[in-house]
Image: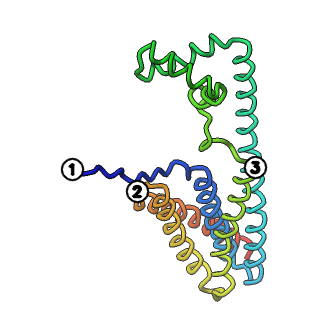
Amino acid sequence: MSRLKAPTERHLVNRIGWLRAAVLGANDGILSTGSLIVGVAAAAAQHHEVLVAGVAALVAGAMSMAAGEYVSVSSQADTEKADLARESEELREFPKYEHEELAQIYVKRGLDHQLAKKVANQLMKKDALGAHARDELGINSISTARPVQAALTSAASFTAGAAMPLLVTLFSPLNMLVASVSVTSLASLALLGAIGARVGGANMLIAAGRVTFWGAFAMAVTAGIGSLFGTTAG
């Protein structure tokens, strides 16, 4: 008699929170810092001026990403806390209504009414607020907002991304700066897009192509603006 072997399940949805912040931060670090360096270099700036601009972009960008993520995710966390507090109060004041409300959610998912009521009753006996948070409000351990984690992840990943075009600037001669930073930045963006897609279980080719296209567009625009201002100033 053969025994059925349970398949190994690999669900990637629990990576969404940190993956989004990490990919966004690194992508923004490479793209914004690389584009700025290309734009400044195209304006016929001196090598040390390009380096200063790159360092300033790295520091300002990392702080901006951290602050932006913290404020944004904190707002989400505040909304979740307010919803949970409101739900907790409703459970105390209207337990029968809340029980029926939860049962109706399960009815809409395919259970008959009697079974839905039994399921709602058992879940509410164990953790009424948790059941309503998960099935009524859509709040669970995966989607719960974590402001500090998001801020630190974004700042660190931005710094890591921005360091790449900055290092290329440090070691590249001025006459090769625009080309070398552009090529390495686009290659890094493509690699980052592919890695992010791989970790998240998405299509690697599509992700890499998408981020590379927008990176090339951004650098072309900043290079054009830098050249224009450099010519005008000259």
Residue for point 53% across, 66% down? 192
Please tell me which of labels 1 and 2 falls first in the chain: 1
Give the side of residue 192 with respect to residue 49, left or right. Answer: left
**Amino acid beneath label 2:** Asn
- Name the residue tied to disc 2: 203
Q: How is the image coloured?
A: rainbow
**Amino acid beneath label 1:** Met
Callout 1 secondary element: loop
Give the side of residue 77 with respect to residue 189, left or right. Answer: right
Q: Mark 3 touching mark 2, by CB under 8 A?
A: no
How crowded pointer 2 is (Cα within 10 Å; few <14, some 14-19, many 20+) is rated as: few
How crowded pointer 1 is (Cα within 10 Å; few <14, some 14-19, many 20+) is rated as: few
Task: Estimate the x, y position of residue 26 in percent, counting from the top left.
Answer: 62, 64
Task: Estimate the x, y position of residue 34 in percent, counting from the top left.
Answer: 63, 70
**Amino acid beneath label 3:** Tyr
Task: Estimate the x, y position of residue 95 in percent, counting from the top left.
Answer: 66, 14
Please tell me which of labels 3 and 1 falls first in the chain: 1
Q: Which mark is residue 1?
A: 1
User: How far apart are the alpha carbons under marks 1 and 2?
Assistant: 40 Å
Q: Nearer the viewer, residue 213 or 102?
A: 102
- Name the residue tied to disc 3: 70
How crowded pointer 3 is (Cα within 10 Å; few <14, some 14-19, many 20+) is rated as: many
